[in-house]
Amino acid sequence: MVGGGRGAFIGAVHRIAAAIDQQVELVCGAFSSDPERSRASGGDFFLPPDRCYGTFEEMIAKEKALPADKRMDFVAIVTPNHMHFPPAKAALEAGFHVLSDKPATLNLAEAKKLAGIVKKTGQLYGLTHNYTGYPLVKQAREMVADGKLGKIRKIVVEYPQGWLATRLEASGQKQAAWRTDPKRSGAAGCIGDIGTHAENLAEYISGLQIEELAADLTSFVKGRALDDDGNVLLRFKGGAKGVLHASQISVGEENNLNIRIYGEKGGLEWHQNEPNTLLVKWLDAPMQVYRTANGYLGKAALAAGRTPPAHPEGYLEAFANIYKNFANHIRARIEGRKLAKDDLCLDYPKIEDGVRGMAFIEAVVKSSKANARWTKLAV
Ligand SMILES: NC(=O)c1ccc[n+]([C@@H]2O[C@H](COP(=O)([O-])OP(=O)(O)OC[C@H]3O[C@@H](n4cnc5c(N)ncnc54)[C@H](O)[C@@H]3O)[C@@H](O)[C@H]2O)c1
């Protein structure tokens, strides 16, 4: 693992998600930008001292020098955005697979470079757009792909939060400080941090790609360099239209990610704060309520659950589904097994999603600077 040391947020989520199915074990790490803190953090996880490294460069070099059956299999990257590309590049080029947190890189140019490195090295690259891991998100995707809703016309996706409604970064709060700093966060704040989750979720469920967009970004909090609120109109390839809004100043909102998709025959509605329910709406019949772990669900949705109906599963389990599929893909590689195109383990976000996410950020920023002019999402 790179990042995720003492005081960090998402690293701990990755460690839990990795362990849920007992397919992945944390064996080493460079957990902090501070070498001493990194070693101390590794001690917290009961790792042997010789595998708690001071830097990711040291970790990659020393792990590479270990015998093949002793060294790490892949690197999980859980650092702030500016520190995604350097360890990803180094790990891939040293022959290790990479599972990175989002957004893929600091900017689109880096993401394109990374896509080239993934292709050249042939290593696996996964991106933890974890919301695609929910069972009923997979159900929604399958129902759209099977044509149950008819041709998709409209997508409304929202990701409001309220935790940056004040100038929290001025207090030195770690997560707020880097997210509002262009050098570490990238060209966008809120749109990069959570808008990309909304963009990825809309494309994942609908199977449609955003072609162009018109965006209006705002930094409501005085003195903040990056957007803390964004409203975006979307045009998808094939004619569907959409609305995306992401916000970190929507006071009182927690992680209220939700999506509604409407086709010619039916509609879908899913909320991440009620993730085990999917509402399915029909033109000429009453609304249906789909629930996780029931036999009427599709293959992907059933495989993504672990407990019987009504035993709540949520964020950590959805996150674990990314880890499970990624680990199964690595296992197939190690065992030299050929995978069918529709093998469930191939269902995790990849570098192509990462490049699209970065192109989305750049297009949103460009459009907003031009007073919400329609702008192509160019990868
Ligand atoms: N998928 C999700 O739902 C989700 C949620 C939160 C954050 N994230 C993403 O995860 C990443 C981290 O976010 P966070 O909130 O955990 O940040 P954080 O500030 O809490 O943690 C970042 C960690 O990276 C470490 N770090 C920084 N530079 C390093 C280096 N050179 N080598 C080793 N470690 C280094 C820091 O010391 C810290 O431990 C971000 O890219 C963010 O966008 C994703």
Image (spheres, rainbow, N blue to C red):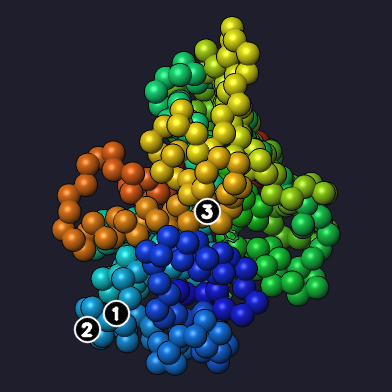
The image shows residue 48, relative to residue 163, as above or below, that is: below
- Residue 18: image quadrant is bottom left
Residue linked to disc 1 = 71
Disc 1 is placed on an element classified as loop
The three-letter amino acid code for the residue at tag 2 is: Pro
Q: In this figure, what is the number of numbered marks?
A: 3
**Quarter of the image with the N terminus in it:** bottom left
Distance CA(mark 1)–CA(mark 2): 6 Å
Instruction: Kindly report which numbered mark, 3 or 1, lies closer to the viewer in this rendering.
Output: 3
Q: Position of residue 370 (x, y in %)?
A: 64, 40
The image shows residue 159, relative to residue 103, as above or below, that is: above
Residue linked to disc 2 = 67
Identify the residue shown where x is 40% and y is 56%.
324
- Quick one: label 2, few (<14), some, or many (20+) residues within 10 Å? few
Distance CA(mark 3)–CA(mark 2): 33 Å
**Quarter of the image with the C terminus in it:** top left
The three-letter amino acid code for the residue at tag 3 is: Glu
- The tag on residue 251 is none
The three-letter amino acid code for the residue at tag 1 is: Arg
Q: Position of residue 351 (x, y in %)?
A: 38, 52
Question: Where ligand 1 lies, by quadrant?
Answer: bottom right
Identify the residue shown where x is 42% and y is 19%.
147
* In the foreground, 137 or 195: 137
Residue linked to disc 3 = 317
